[in-house]
Image (cartoon, helix red, strand yellow):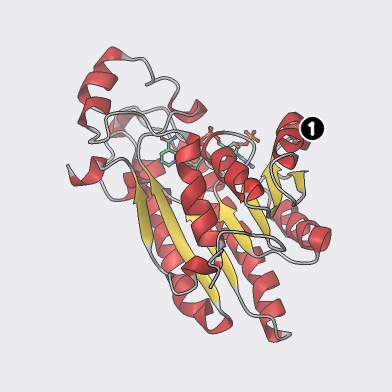
Amino acid sequence: MVYQPFDLTGKTALVTGGNRGIGYGMSEALAASNANVAIWCRNAASADNVVAELSELGTGEVKAFSVDVTDEQAVIDSMALTNAWKGRIDTVIANAGVSARGIPFVEQDTETYRQVLSVNLDGAYWTLREAAKVMVERAKNGDPGGSLIGTASMAAIEGAARNQAYAATKGGLISMIKATAVELARYGIRANSILPGWIATDMTSNSQGNDKFEDNVIKRVPIRRWGEPKDFGGIAVYLASDASSFHTGDTLLVDGGYCIF
Ligand SMILES: NC(=O)c1ccc[n+]([C@@H]2O[C@H](COP(=O)([O-])OP(=O)(O)OC[C@H]3O[C@@H](n4cnc5c(N)ncnc54)[C@H](OP(=O)(O)O)[C@@H]3O)[C@@H](O)[C@H]2O)c1
């Protein structure tokens, strides 16, 4: 028997925020595994080089779409456009996210709180709901299956000081994913959350190279380094593939062992 579940030929994956950081690491591995990859970011033209680079990796196609996930109508329209691109969407990774500057709870303002919620929670909700519509419709037409993924954070399960808004969105996303896993399993649709630890991306640029942070936090990571975007390629391909066909409702920590130490 030849076992090749990680060959994603014929499958289409959508990654929100797939142009940079963790989403880029996921998109790169999905493209290299022969999936068609749709990347959503706010300015598709800014991802031209990423599209060109990833298109060389596998046999699938790569295309960027301009979508601000805080705009419900834009998400609705773009999901329809993305589905029309290849006639199907098999995997959707709600990964786009923002953090807020870490300041004491008592000094935080409502405007920032709402901004973080609008991308991380509203954006993920609309993305996952519209993706679910596409997948449920396809299942009702005799072609069940699909993988919904939310990029949450270990901030949802550890005490993330000075990050109340961010942590709340990630805890909410995990709950949203679990509810979806139970409800949509009958259509063969799976839903899982990925919880990154400390990852070197634009989001954490202020902490990278900061001696105090490196000493107090990164030295405590059992694997003893920052995570990299490419560390998220394997989990994205696994969850997009038939290898994970009985795996749903889970919260998968990818943190170099930080949370158990
Ligand atoms: N880095 C970490 O240590 C870490 C840890 C735990 C969880 N995470 C989570 O991992 C995910 C990716 O983070 P990252 O570290 O890769 O961050 P990043 O490098 O700052 O990338 C953020 C991505 O989100 C997109 N995005 C932001 N706002 C958007 C909007 N309104 N509409 C559409 N796209 C939008 C950005 O696209 P544009 O180019 O359009 O800005 C970009 O692709 C986030 O959900 C984050 O919360 C990160």
Q: Quadrant of ligand 1?
A: top right
Decide: few, some or many residues near mark 1? Use Cα within 10 Å; few <14, some 14-19, many ≥20.
few
Asked if 151 appears above or below 108 in the picture, the reply is below
Disc 1 secondary structure class: helix
148 or 122, which lies in front?
Answer: 148
Q: Which residue is mark 1?
A: 45
Q: Quadrant of residue 2?
A: bottom right
Q: Position of residue 41 (x, y in %)?
A: 68, 40
Up/down of 167 relative to 47, above or below: below
- Towards the viewer: 187 or 33: 33
Q: Position of residue 244 (x, y in %)?
A: 47, 67
Residue, x 20% and y 31% (percent of image)?
A: 220
Residue ID at (74%, 85%): 141
Q: Amino acid at mark 1?
A: Ala
* Side of 101 where 216 appears, left or right: left
Q: Residue at x 70, y 54 (%)?
A: 75
